Image: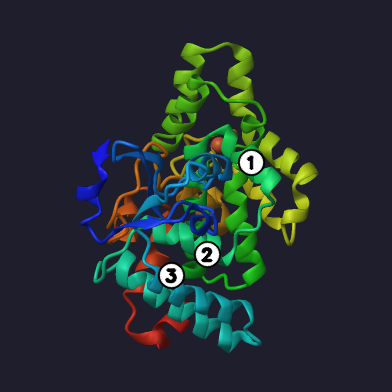
């Protein structure tokens, strides 16, 4: 807890009515409630799903909430406009033009580090451009594990950006690959997942193969099977229950491969990088970029795409370099 009066001297921390915050799906910064003794209690962390039940609980106490604002509204608005140009593009040239403008703005911060930027800006951008999961399904997903929901939002927009760098520009496809990320662990989230299972997921993302190894030491066969079969089970569950969310079923197959690893140590098939399609490499690479227990902090987006190259597919790494280091829009266009 912190004395709120001294905190409010910082212009990033503003008093705000709870209603205003409800327009966001992911917290645009840390959100605090002011206690009677003027202490601040953090009720939501940056990027957390804006649970209206939590917000209403504190809004009913009549005092405004405090937002420690992290998002860069102007930058997000600018990239959003280019995504809308991509969505409404009438021909290939307009698509190429919109793509180049998006990648130029992304590259400035997330590759070159020439401007400040945070990962929460990417989450917010993804939300603004694509998010269309109905509230009932959203609740199912994030109650399974709140941190996973936030990380999946980040993975989703990073999959979109990887796809753009590789050359995919169809808006409906991008919308689908964004949403696929939210359902990677769908079959596990149907029931409340226990600590051991949660650890296995986190460990598997960090070092493919290790999550399964640890889980087999600590738990029974049934739990292990549930984990090892979840890529296939999630695919079947989404195909049956969630299919209307997606423009086509093409992207859903990617769910079956999300735990394959580039070095062949993943599961269930143990495929190596040269056995994976571009799209499979994209989903595997984006899911390797984030640890769900890591807090989002200001400036954590600077040079992000350069830093993650050690975790991702060589194909995508080359595509990123070629897009972000090309001179001028004509070269970016050629890469498409
Ligand atoms: Fe998974």
The crowding category of the residue bearing disc 2, from other C-alpha atoms within 10 Å (few below 14, some 14 to 19, many at least 20), is many
State the CA–CA distance, disc 3 to disc 1.
26 Å
**Which of the two discs, 3 and 2, labels the residue nearer the N terminus?**
3
Per the image, label 3 sits on a secondary structure element best described as: helix
Q: Which mark is residue 139?
A: 1
Decide which of 132, 62 is in the foreground and name it: 62
Decide which of 115, 335 is in the foreground and name it: 115
Q: Residue at x 42, y 88 (%)?
A: 330
Per the image, label 2 sits on a secondary structure element best described as: helix
Say if 317 sits above or below 214 in the image: below
Decide which of 90, 129 is in the foreground and name it: 129
Check if mark 3's residue and mark 2's residue have beta carbons within 8 Å.
no
Decide which of 37, 227 is in the foreground and name it: 37
**Which of the two discs, 3 and 1, labels the residue nearer the N terminus?**
3
State the CA–CA distance, disc 1 to disc 2.
28 Å
Q: Residue at x 49, y 52 (%)?
A: 18
Q: Quadrant of the N terminus?
A: top left
Outermost residue on the right side: it is 240
Q: Position of residue 327 (x, y in %)?
A: 32, 83
The residue that mark 2 highlights is 163
The residue that mark 3 highlights is 76
**Which of the two discs, 1 and 2, labels the residue nearer the N terminus?**
1
The nearer-to-camera label among 1 and 2 is 1
Q: Position of residue 44 (x, y in %)?
A: 43, 42
Check if mark 1's residue and mark 2's residue have beta carbons within 8 Å.
no
The crowding category of the residue bearing disc 3, from other C-alpha atoms within 10 Å (few below 14, some 14 to 19, many at least 20), is some
Q: Residue at x 29, y 36 (%)?
A: 37
Q: Quadrant of residue 139?
A: top right
Q: Which mark is residue 124?
A: none
Instruction: Give ligand 1's quarter of the image.
Output: top right
């Amino acid at each position: 807890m912190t004395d709120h009066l001294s905190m409010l001297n910082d212009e990033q921390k503003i008093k705000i009515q709870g209603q205003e915050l409800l327009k966001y799906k992911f917290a645009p910064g840390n959100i605090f409630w002011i206690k009677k003794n003027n202490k601040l209690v953090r009720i939501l962390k940056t990027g957390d799903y804006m649970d209206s039940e939590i917000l209403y609980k504190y809004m009913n106490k009549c005092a405004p909430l405090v937002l420690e604002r992290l998002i860069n509204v102007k930058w997000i608005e600018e990239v959003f406009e280019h995504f809308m140009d991509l969505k409404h593009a009438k021909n290939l040239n307009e698509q190429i033009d919109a793509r180049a403008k998006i990648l130029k703005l992304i590259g400035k911060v997330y590759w070159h580090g020439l401007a400040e930027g945070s990962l929460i800006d990417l989450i917010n951008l993804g939300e603004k451009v694509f998010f269309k999961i109905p509230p009932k399904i959203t609740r199912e997903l994030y109650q399974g594990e709140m941190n996973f929901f936030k990380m999946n939002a980040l993975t989703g927009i990073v999959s979109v950006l990887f796809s753009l760098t590789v050359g995919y520009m169809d808006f409906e496809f991008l919308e689908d690959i964004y949403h696929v990320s939210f359902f990677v662990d769908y079959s596990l989230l149907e029931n409340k997942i226990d600590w051991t299972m949660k650890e296995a997921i986190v460990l598997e993302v960090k070092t493919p193969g290790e999550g399964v190894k640890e889980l087999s030491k600590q738990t029974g066969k049934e739990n292990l099977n549930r984990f090892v079969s979840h890529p296939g089970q999630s695919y079947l569950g989404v195909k049956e229950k969630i299919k209307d969310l997606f423009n086509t079923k093409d992207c859903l197959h990617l769910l079956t491969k999300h735990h394959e690893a580039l070095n062949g140590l993943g599961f269930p098939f143990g495929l190596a990088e040269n056995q994976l399609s571009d799209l499979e490499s994209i989903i595997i690479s984006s899911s390797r970029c984030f640890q769900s227990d890591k807090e989002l902090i200001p400036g954590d987006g600077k040079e992000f795409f350069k830093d993650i190259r050690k975790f991702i597919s060589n194909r995508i790494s080359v595509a990123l370099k070629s897009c972000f280091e090309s001179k001028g829009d004509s070269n970016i266009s050629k890469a498409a």
